[in-house]
């Protein structure tokens, strides 16, 4: 149990998954959040047909068109190349790329746009969300150093910046944001399914085997979401480790002799280390982009293993599944960390006893 109450945790931004529509922050600048997924995903996916790579830079594993006459078909209207009945689309200039751009841009369902209240968020939150969804680091390392956020004097500001990364992923994982993301991703899947039927009819006329365009999209989507989360997670943990090491080094400088009580300076340092631990918990449980509700028929292994009943769990078994709820996920993760910490302490104590027995140390007088 920490010696501090939750109200004392000044350096950690409180979560954004609790929304009070009546609250108006006097310093927030609200902007329209028009797009959930970057529009550039459409052209990046289209590049797969022209020997491009996945978002992470890896080569795709799913089969894709290898013949030169097929590599640009994703960008061409079906009426120009597809056999009947696929050469008579509802929109004469329609092609798979333009449909994908329209869907990712939120124009795939005009009725939904009219019936749904526009989504808005804080400008700083929107900026951070945009950076991470483009696969960029939350802040360049040079900028981090230029701001002096690695220095002890700027500990509070550094925690605030790192909390903004967590806030961005909490926002992305809000139900309304996830619903928009699922609609866009599943709409592209439907577009790929339509294009796949036309493409395979084209290939059949030329004696070529069928390929799965939906599987190509699934691999691209899973790779994209995984890469975005992994990059942000790795960057944030690296900054947290730097801040933690600085505090531990500072603590070691205050220990000159055995003492019975902690000095105020040591309490302050441990207080900050506790803040970093709390923030690490949030980083590990919030910076993720699970895929429930996303249409995956080929890459079914990417479907997250959700577990809602955690009654009686004390952390003794690995978390092969996780709660979908962000808050509950944090609690279960804390139980697992506590169990692992206790196990490490027991093993360390047993190792110390074993080394003492090998040296033949005599137990202290009065020791049990």
Image (cartoon, grey):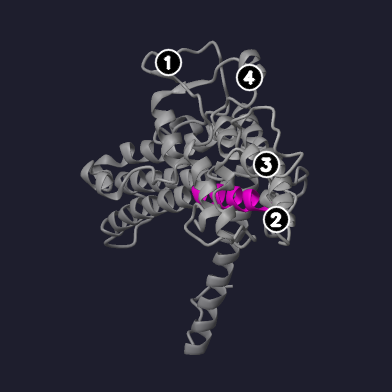
Earlier sequence position, callout 2 versus callout 3? 3
Whether the magenta-drawn stretch holds residue 94 is answered as: no
Mark 1 or mark 3, which has the lower sequence index? 1
Q: Does the magenta stretch include residue 224?
A: yes
Q: Name the residue under label 3.
A: 189
Quarter occupied by residue 67: bottom right
- Tell me the residue that label 1 is attached to: 25
Residue receiving disc 2: 203
Q: In this view, does 152 lie to the left or right of 78?
A: left
- Residue range corresponding to the magenta coloring: 215-229
Instruction: Identify the element where label 2 is drawn.
Output: helix
User: Of circles 2 and 3, which is in front?
Assistant: 2
Indicate which disc, 4 or 1, sits on the residue closer to the N terminus: 1
Kind of element beneath mark 3:
helix
Q: In this view, does 191 lie to the left or right of 143?
A: right
User: According to the image, label 4 marks what residue?
Assistant: 110
Compute the Cα span from label 4 to label 1: 32 Å
Q: Is residue 58 left or right of residue 243?
A: right
Residue at x-position 64% and y-position 60%: 62
Q: Position of residue 260 (x, y in %)?
A: 38, 55
Label 1 neighbour load within 10 Å: few <14, some 14-19, many 20+: few
Whole-Å distance between the Cαs marked 2 and 3? 20 Å
Pick the front one: 199 or 280:
199
């Amino acid at each position: 149990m920490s010696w501090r109450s939750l109200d004392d945790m000044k350096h950690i931004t409180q979560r954004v998954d609790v929304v009070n529509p009546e609250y108006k922050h006097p310093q927030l600048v609200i902007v329209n959040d028009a797009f959930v997924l970057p529009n550039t995903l459409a052209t990046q996916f289209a590049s797969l047909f022209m020997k491009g790579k996945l978002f992470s830079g890896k080569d795709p594993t799913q089969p894709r068109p290898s013949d030169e006459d097929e590599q640009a078909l994703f960008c061409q209207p079906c009426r120009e190349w597809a056999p009947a009945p696929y050469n008579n689309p509802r929109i004469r200039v329609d092609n798979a790329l333009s449909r994908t751009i329209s869907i990712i841009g939120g124009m795939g369902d005009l009725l939904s746009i009219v019936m749904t209240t526009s989504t808005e968020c804080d400008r700083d939150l929107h900026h951070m969300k945009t950076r991470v969804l483009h696969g960029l680091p939350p802040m360049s390392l040079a900028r981090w150093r230029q701001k002096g956020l690695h220095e002890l004097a700027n500990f509070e500001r550094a925690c605030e910046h790192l909390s903004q990364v967590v806030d961005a992923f909490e926002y992305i994982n809000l139900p309304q944001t996830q619903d928009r993301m699922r609609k866009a991703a599943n709409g592209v899947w439907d577009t790929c399914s339509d294009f796949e039927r036309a493409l395979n009819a084209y290939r059949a006329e030329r004696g070529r085997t069928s390929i799965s365009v939906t599987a190509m999209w699934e691999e691209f989507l899973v790779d994209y979401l995984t890469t975005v989360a992994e990059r942000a997670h790795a960057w944030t943990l690296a900054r947290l480790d730097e801040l933690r090491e600085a505090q531990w080094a500072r603590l070691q400088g205050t220990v000159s002799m055995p003492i019975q009580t902690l000095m105020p300076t040591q309490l302050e340092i441990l207080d900050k280390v506790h803040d970093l631990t709390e923030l690490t918990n949030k980083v590990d449980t919030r910076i993720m982009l699970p895929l429930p509700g996303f249409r995956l028929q080929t890459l079914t292994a990417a479907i997250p293993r959700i577990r809602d009943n955690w009654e009686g769990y004390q952390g003794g078994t690995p978390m092969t599944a996780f709660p979908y709820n962000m808050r509950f996920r944090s609690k279960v993760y804390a139980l697992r960390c506590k169990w692992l910490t206790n196990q490490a302490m027991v093993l360390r104590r047993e190792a110390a006893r074993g080394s003492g027995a090998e040296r033949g140390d005599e137990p202290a007088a009065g020791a049990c």
